[in-house]
Amino acid sequence: MKIEIESQHKSSYDHKVVICDKKMVFKFFPEVISKTGFEPKDYNLVMVKPNLCGLYHPQLRLIELVLSFFETYAQKIVIGETDSMSHTPEVQFRTLGILDMVKQFDKVKAINLMEDKILDLEVPSAHVINNLPIPNLVHHCDLLVNIPKVGTHMRTMLTCAIKNLFGLLAEKHKYSAYHSIGVDQVLADLMKIVRCDLNVADVRNKVILGVDPLTVDILACKFVGLDPLNVEYLRLVSADRNLKLEKVVNQLQIIKM
């Protein structure tokens, strides 16, 4: 079934991003995320997407912090992940301590999104792929919180907020399916049909927070010695917004806490 997406997520191109010591994040999380411009409200369904089946896993305590904060506002919270070539969510939920952690919450479930109804979403003005398989829960959640860990990647150079959303694609063999046609272009296409509302990126002893995954990724480049102007998918995402990446970089407002 082909569905042209009508995004329910607030799409913000705010050039503001927050960098904060983990100790302060754990102590003052509501105050820290307010600096990004994010304002929580009541939600029926909150989707939390940590990087669990990739190479870089965010600190469990950081995931727990996000769940604790949003449980106040949500009727239901789903920790969602899809299969990768190396891992299944079920194994990673157990191995990384997710299953034990969610026992303390009444509203949280850890779900393999491959078992959800999969929508064949049309990508408007696609770079390389006209339709992408997106779980129904992702498409219809009221809030999507993205929790990546910053690292380097052989193909995309950077893995952080936007690359973590690649894990929402309901395709086990992602490497063979998408890397051969240009994973940077696929990431840009994905950004046209999936929008996240808050990004909480784990990077060493700090956390990068922002409402826009593009600005979070730009700042993340600094921590792995990359020039964001050399990361192709950042250029493509900027161009799709009719923005020059150089201008976004220059206008980036970094709030240090």
Image (cartoon, helix red, strand yellow):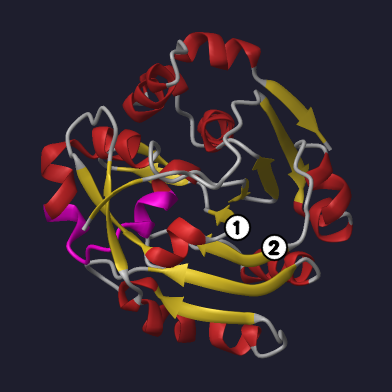
Whether residues under marks 1 and 2 lie with C-beta atoms below 8 angstroms apart, the answer is yes
Quadrant location, the N terminus: bottom left
Q: Position of residue 210 (x, y in %)?
A: 66, 39
Up the image or down, 156 lies above or below 68; here it is above
Q: Which residue is drawn at 60% across and 10% down?
A: 250
Q: In which quarter of the image is residue 38?
A: top right
In the picture, residue 81 is in which quadrant?
A: bottom left
Element carrying mark 1: loop
- Residue 227 visible: no
Percent x, y of residue 137: 45, 66
| Quadrant location of the C terminus in the rendered image | top right
Residue 57 location (% of width, % of height): 49, 63
Q: What stretch is highlighted in magenta?
A: 164-176
Q: What element carries label 2?
A: strand
The residue to which callout 2 is attached is 43
**Residue 64: x and y, percent?**
69, 71
